[in-house]
């Protein structure tokens, strides 16, 4: 945005409303069928015109670095310095947060980030996805979804985006992902995810991932928060002077990804760490039985970097073991 025309419009999301130059925070009730949940939402309506950016954290309820980082930025940004508007859903899956649930929404045992764009008449996660898609993602110029490794996952920091075929949209996604400045940038679709739902609507979308394992050390929160601030600067929503915090880096581009899942229950013994570089065919771990006998010897299907790694000894059939990203 090169001009700084005055912003005349109120910012309204499902009954929450902010005047130009105002920050408003509140709980928005969303009916999920069997239960009404309250989403903590912050609206920041800039005093000058610009892009509308929607941001979510806590789509997975136990991803604390992302939740802590979004809250920090959303409550600190001065609306008077914002061009455009920010809609921030601080904890997008409150039932999963309360239950400290890994991957799944306890209300229907579904992964919220696999059911987008959702179904307003479906199960709890499908209704929540439909609500977020219609009220938060739709109508935005840019969508940012903040994640980290889950309660049982270590990860190396990365951003993600996909290509929509629209040059302007893809250029904005790339610009924002580059500004986020994490170790890796993974380009590719993730069906059923928030970012794919945004891309389907023709909205630029970026995923940010920092930290994990149920911890939220200041080191990780500040990296995620600083990345978000730089992303908002790149989108023209914040002035350059708001890009404070630890410096970003030039992300290594990855265009191929392999997610490895276990096809048996058992005990997971990884042989690698996150950030390790592995060769195709290299042993990366074993799923053993209760007595220690090897049930599955896992090899890397492609060479690349270990992006995330499940760190719990317990392993369930169908669950992820690790992901490898490759250039
Ligand atoms: Zn996640």
Image (cartoon, helix red, strand yellow):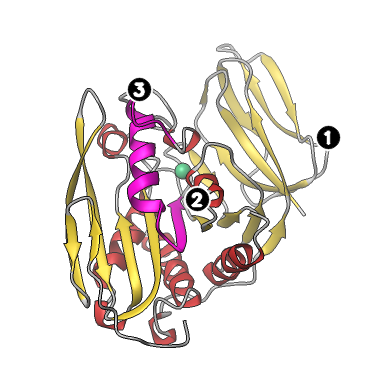
Magenta residue span: 118-147
State the residue position of label 3: 108
Is 155 drawn above or below residue 105 in the view shown?
Answer: below
**Residue shown at the point (42%, 26%) measured from the top left:** 110
Secondary-structure class at tag 2: helix
Left/right placement of residue 302 relative to residue 247 reads right
**Badge 1 or badge 3: first in the primary sequence:** 3
Q: The residue tagged with tag 1: helix, strand or loop?
A: loop
Going from the N terminus, do you reach mark 2 or mark 3 first? 3
Look at mark 1 in the image and give the residue it sits on.
Answer: 281
Determine if the magenta segment contains residue 133.
Answer: yes
Which of the 4 image quadrants contains residue 53?
bottom left
Picture quadrant where residue 202 is located: bottom right
Q: For residue 161: magenta?
A: no
The numbered disc on residue 302 is none
Label 1 residue near ligand 1, CB within 8 Å: no
Residue 263: x, y in percent?
A: 64, 18
Q: Position of residue 4 (x, y in %)?
A: 38, 87
* Secondary-structure class at tag 3: loop
Badge 1 crowding class, 10 Å Cα cut-off, few under 14, some 14 to 19, many 20 or more, is: few
Alpha carbon distance from label 2 to label 3: 23 Å
Disc 2 target residue: 198
């Amino acid at each position: 945005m090169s001009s700084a025309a005055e912003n005349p419009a109120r910012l309204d999301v499902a009954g929450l409303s902010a005047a130009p130059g105002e920050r408003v925070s509140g709980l928005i009730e969303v009916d999920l069928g069997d239960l009404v949940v309250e989403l903590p939402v912050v609206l920041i309506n800039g005093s000058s015109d610009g892009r509308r950016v929607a941001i979510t954290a806590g789509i997975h309820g136990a991803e604390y670095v992302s939740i802590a980082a979004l809250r920090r930025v959303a409550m600190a940004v001065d609306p008077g310095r914002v061009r455009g508007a920010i809609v921030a859903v601080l904890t997008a899956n409150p039932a999963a947060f309360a239950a400290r649930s890994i991957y799944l929404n306890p209300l229907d045992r579904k992964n919220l980030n696999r059911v987008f764009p959702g179904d307003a008449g479906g199960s709890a996660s499908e209704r929540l996805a439909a609500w977020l898609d219609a009220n938060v993602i739709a109508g935005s110029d840019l969508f940012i979804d903040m994640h980290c490794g889950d309660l049982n996952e270590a990860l190396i920091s990365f951003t993600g985006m996909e290509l929509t075929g629209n040059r302007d949209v893809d250029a904005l996604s790339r610009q924002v992902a580059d500004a986020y400045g994490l170790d890796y940038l993974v380009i590719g679709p993730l069906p059923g995810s928030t970012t794919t739902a945004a891309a389907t609507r023709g909205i630029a979308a970026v995923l940010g991932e920092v930290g994990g394992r149920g911890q939220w050390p200041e080191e990780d929160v500040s990296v995620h928060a600083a990345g978000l601030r730089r992303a908002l600067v790149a989108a023209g929503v914040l002035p350059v002077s708001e890009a404070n915090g630890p410096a970003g880096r030039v992300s290594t581009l990855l265009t191929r990804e392999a997610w490895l899942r276990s096809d048996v229950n058992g005990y997971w013994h990884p042989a690698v760490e996150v950030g390790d570089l592995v060769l195709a065919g290299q042993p990366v771990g074993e799923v053993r039985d209760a007595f220690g006998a090897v049930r599955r010897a896992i090899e890397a299907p492609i060479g690349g970097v270990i992006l995330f790694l499940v760190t719990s000894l317990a392993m369930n059939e169908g669950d992820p073991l690790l992901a490898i990203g490759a250039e």
